[in-house]
Image (tube, grey):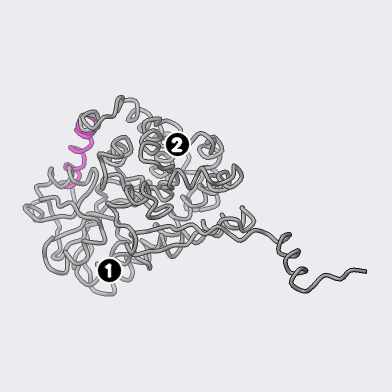
Amino acid sequence: MRYLSSAAILAVALSFSPAQAKELIYGSWLGAKSSTNEIAMPVYFDAITKATNGEIAWKLVAGGQLVTGPGTVEGVKNNLVDAGVVMAPYTPKELPATNLIFSTAVLGDDVIAASGAMNEVVMLNCPECLAEYKRNKAVAFAGYSTSPYLLMCRQPVQSVAELQGRKVRSSGGGVSIMQIAGATPVAMNPADATSALERGAIDCVLGSVAWLKNYGYMDSVRGVLTYPMGMGGPPLLMYINRDVWSDMTPAQRKAHVDNAAKLVAVTTIDAQLKIDDEVVVEAKKKGIKFAEGGEDFAKVMAKRGEIQREENAKVARASGVKNPEAILDAFDKAVEKWKGLSKEIGLDPAKFEAVLKREVYDKVDPEKL
């Protein structure tokens, strides 16, 4: 009888063992302790590893170590990272159709409706969005809406009159809102605004209240105006290099899309809305003053609602979007539809995930992205 050596036995065993996981790099410019990176992305990446039987493992590199906010589109295109989070207002020339949606402020405070509508429009009703991702050698999905943007200032603001001339970090539709209010909008990503607030280079940030914690504004901000000043989005959480996507098997691509609804639901509710409530409690303990705002801010938002469609369509068309009105019509229709759906969802991530799958992601063919 012929006996195999121990080395030969090991070689045979290895030939039948599962392949080592392919590690892919997710470069995030969000801080390592941001709720998105601490809460939402790990849930999604764990789901992908499980769904692919360990064949795909995503590694999160946070804090802008590999790519900045404005640099993520180019970084993904050149395969500096395999994927990242993209904000269209940072690269409007590359993503004009997505930026059209992002610049259209959703009024009110129904974040579930806004997030659902943004996913439905981008994935199902905006072929120009999908085309621009392809032009930039990418595939994108899993967007969400921010919670209502609030004014967070070094010195408390309680009226539009007190806002005159103040320098406010703004993006998307927030730029126009600040101009209507008489403030001076300043283009800057949220991470850079931390030091700008500390130095007094800007007076306020227009953004989600969770940013007080996520970006460390808590020590610089002394007042928050809670009047909702539009919801923006979608930040695209999964913006993946197209060659990386193509190298995946159909089953692996399907796993990414099948779990996109989970990522959106967890990000929107667990990593955002619930964190917002916790941050408000913490901020009040630190002595930050909260003011509601009044009719003067309602007039600002009403004015924005009146002019944003024509203004945004004009900018989008000049940037190469062929049919901005069709995108805006689909978005308006989707927002109204999701306002009804949000009533059955409440703040339950599992319910939101199920409705997102039913209404959006079960209708998305990964092979056609």
Q: Which residues are magenta?
A: 297-312
> What residue occupies the far front of the structure in this picture?
2
- Residue at x 57%, y 43% (from the top left corner): 254
Does the magenta-highlighted stretch encompass residue 32? Answer: no
Query: On screen, 108 above or below 7?
Result: above
Task: Determine which residue is flagged by label 1.
Answer: 216
Q: Amino acid at mark 1?
A: Gly
Q: Residues within 10 Å of mark 2 (few under 14, many from 20)?
A: many
Q: Is residue 218 visible?
A: yes
Mark drawn on residue 123: 2
Which is more toward the observer, 9 or 294? 9
Q: Residues within 10 Å of mark 1 (few under 14, many from 20)?
A: some
In what element is the residue under mark 2? helix
Determine the main secondary structure of the stretch shown in magenta: helix
Q: Are marks 1 and 2 in contact (CB under 8 Å)?
A: no
x then y, percent, for residue 98: 33, 38
Nearer to us of marks 1 and 2 is 2
x then y, percent, for residue 262: 52, 51
Q: Calculate the distance from the C-alpha at mark 1 to the C-alpha at mark 2.
A: 33 Å
Tell me if 279 is positioned left or right of 181 in this view. Answer: right
